[in-house]
Amino acid sequence: MATQNPPIGSALDHFKLLCDYIKFHLGLYLATPPVFAVIAKALGQKVIASPYFLSGFAVLVGLCFVSGVCASWFMGRHLNRSWETGESVDWDADASNLRRRFLHHYLYWFGLVAALAGLIAAAITAPAPT
């Protein structure tokens, strides 16, 4: 059985950048929903209880969850594998794959837009404090 050595040189640098890139996205998926919750809390109880905000927030959380799971699977498939199996990995094809880009980027942005729209709609329709 042929073994595959871990990447070295520029391949190792590319590998490290890809790992940092994925970790950055995982951080975004985890940090964005709490930011929206804090903003909604600052805007008042009527905004938090608004169906507009709750719907947008639920979409954000769901899409961040899907994006995070896909990014974690990507990391697991490429990093948490035996280097001795001889399994080849085409980093360029996998990293620039349109499906991966959609799952890691576009779903996040769709969720962000949904949460922002829900927050704005909730803030606009919330009755003014008396």
Image: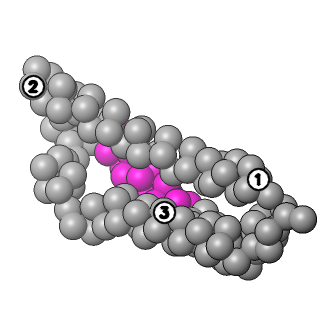
Identify the amino acid type marked 1.
Lys
Displayed quadrant of residue 121: bottom right
**SS of the residue under disc 2:** helix
Q: What's the residue at 59%, 68% (across, down)? A: 120
Q: What's the residue at 13%, 49% (across, down)? A: 92
Query: Label 2, label 1: how many angstroms apart (C-alpha)?
Result: 47 Å
Residue underneath mark 1: 41
- Furthest-front residue in view? 130
Q: What's the residue at 55%, 50% (across, down)? A: 32
Q: What's the residue at 80%, 74% (across, down)? A: 127
Identify the amino acid type marked 3.
Leu
- Furthest-top residue in view? 9
Q: Earlier in the sequence, mark 3 or mark 1?
A: 1
Measured as percent of width and height from the top left, residue 116 is found at 53, 65
Label 3 vs label 2, nearer the camera = 3
**SS of the residue under disc 3:** helix
- Magenta: predominant secondary structure element? helix
Q: Earlier in the sequence, mark 3 or mark 2?
A: 2
Residue underneath mark 3: 112
Left/right of residue 99 with respect to residue 45 in the rendered view: left
Residue range of the region highlighted in magenta in the rendering: 64-79
Q: Earlier in the sequence, mark 2 or mark 1?
A: 2
Identify the amino acid type marked 2.
Ser
Contact check, label 3 and label 1, Cβ < 8 Å: no
Q: Alpha-carbon neighbours of circle 3 within 10 Å: few (<14), some, or many (≥20)?
A: many
Quadrant location of the C terminus in the rendered image? bottom right
Q: Is residue 63 visible?
A: no
Query: Label 3, label 2: how many angstroms apart (C-alpha)?
Result: 35 Å
Measured as percent of width and height from the top left, residue 79 is found at 35, 39
Residue 10 numbered tag: 2
- Residue 24 vertical position relative to residue 32 in the rendered view, above or below: above
